[in-house]
Image: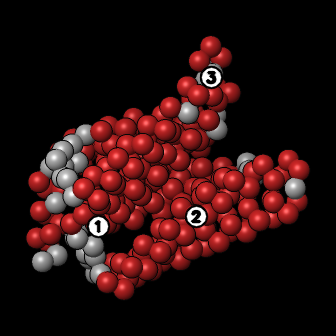
């Protein structure tokens, strides 16, 4: 049953995530799809964590990834919400989770390199997920020091965290579970397209929001409401 729930949540996460990614930012469709994405991704992360821990399914990589995915989704959501009592402590707690996951992944990566041979081939994912975790922790340190972000910085923080969570889901399904995909379309460049689509779209929006400061396609609620809330 846990596996069934995990698969269903992951499938819904992919659908809702892509809808939210390509919908007008801050518009009703984006917000509704985003909330569905948050709920199902947290479900997927929890069930994936349980499967890895209880059944021993590659726990060294799957447990940190499950924690990282849950962390990214929660911090992306809280970034766009008005600050509540205890929000700073929540941020600190999540910061510690990201820091722990990041250091663990980097350590496993160096251990894999040291062992050499086939083991060295799995070092790259450890380093990538470790880097994402440490970047997230660094962003949390900034929020703890300076307070809630505003404007473009807030949108960018929300965007890259949600996008990376979706990228993890796409990677896990289309590449990690490639064996369940019909053989005629089990072509690696084709299976990599959903992941590449997420990453390309994420970097495009980060470029527009952070560098060009172009908010065309971002609903008014996506910018003005957070600014008014924290003014």
Which callout, 3 or 2, points at the residue further toward the start of the chain?
2
Dots 1, 3 in contact, CB < 8 A:
no
Dots 3, 2 in contact, CB < 8 A:
no
Instruction: Please state which of residues 181 and 219 is positioned toward the viewer in this rendering.
Output: 219
Left/right of residue 169 with respect to residue 20 in the rendered view: right
- Is there any visible trace of residue 59 in the rendered image? no
Residue displayed at 18% across by 45% down: 217
Residue, far front? 212
Which callout, 1 or 3, points at the residue further toward the start of the chain?
1
Instruction: Please state which of residues 163 and 68 is positioned toward the viewer in this rendering.
Output: 163
- Is there any visible trace of residue 150 in the rendered image? yes
* Residue 196 x/y as whole percent: 49, 38
As helix, strand or loop, the secondary structure at mark 3 comes to: loop
Q: Which residue lies under the disc numbered 1?
A: 153
Q: Which residue lies under the disc numbered 3?
A: 187
* Residue 64 x/y as whole percent: 63, 60
Q: Which residue lies under the disc numbered 2?
A: 131
């Amino acid at each position: 049953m846990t596996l069934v729930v995990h698969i269903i949540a992951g499938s819904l996460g992919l659908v809702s995530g892509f809808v939210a990614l390509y919908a007008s930012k801050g518009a009703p469709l984006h917000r509704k799809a985003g909330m569905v994405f948050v709920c199902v991704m947290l479900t997927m992360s929890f069930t994936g964590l349980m499967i890895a821990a209880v059944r021993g399914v590659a726990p060294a990589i799957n447990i940190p990834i499950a924690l990282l995915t849950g962390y990214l989704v929660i911090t992306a959501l809280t970034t766009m919400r008005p600050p509540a009592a205890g929000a700073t402590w929540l941020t600190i707690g999540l910061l510690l989770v990201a820091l722990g996951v990041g250091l663990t992944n980097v350590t496993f990566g160096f251990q894999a390199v040291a062992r050499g041979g086939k083991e060295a081939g799995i070092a790259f994912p450890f380093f990538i997920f470790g880097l994402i975790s440490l970047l997230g922790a660094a962003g949390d340190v900034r929020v703890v020091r300076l307070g809630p972000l505003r404007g473009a910085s807030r949108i960018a923080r929300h965007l890259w965290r949600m996008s990376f969570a979706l990228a993890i889901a796409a990677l896990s399904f289309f590449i990690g579970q490639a064996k369940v995909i019909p053989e005629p379309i089990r072509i690696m460049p084709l299976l990599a397209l959903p992941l590449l689509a997420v990453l390309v779209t994420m970097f495009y929006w980060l470029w527009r929001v952070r560098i060009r400061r172009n908010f065309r396609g971002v609903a008014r609620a996506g910018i003005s409401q957070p600014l008014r809330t924290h003014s």
